[in-house]
Amino acid sequence: MELNFLQDYIVLVVLGICLCVGYAMKQLDFIKNKYIPAIMLCLGTVVNIIVNIPNMNATVILGGMVSGLASTGLYEAMRNLIDSNGKKDGNANV
């Protein structure tokens, strides 16, 4: 199944905000990692709705959701690029 059409819905401002908030949440010990994608989905939706209040429609909601989830994937891709071994290091903070 091709999901390339979802790239048209990514909003860079929302992606950046979710990436930064998600990174900060990842550093906190009391938030479980399995909840971060769901939180980013909700945060991305809310931020994109706030940014686009006058032009509110379903595309705005989809753009926020896709951007929030894309931020979790972008974080993992950046972490894998930085990690030279491609394996998780138990001593790393990231």
Image (tube, rainbow, N blue to C red):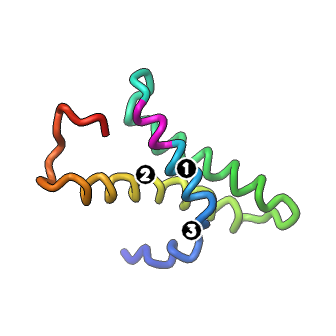
Instruction: Return the mark for residue 10.
Output: 3
**Stretch of the chain drawn in magenta:** 22-27
Can you identify the residue that label 2 sits on?
Answer: 72
Q: CA distance from mark 3 to mark 2?
A: 13 Å
Residue occupying the point 41% across, 36% down: 26
Q: Which residue occupies the foreground of this view, 23 or 45?
A: 23
Going by the numbered disc 3, the residue's amino acid type is Ile
Going by the numbered disc 1, the residue's amino acid type is Cys
Residue occupying the point 50% across, 74% down: 7
Secondary structure beneath dot 2 equals helix
In the image, residue 78 above or below residue 34? below
- N-terminal-most mark, 3 or 2: 3
Q: CA distance from mark 3 to mark 1?
A: 12 Å
Going by the numbered disc 2, the residue's amino acid type is Thr
Is 46 situated left or right of 18 in this image? Answer: right
Instruction: Return the mark for residue 18.
Output: 1
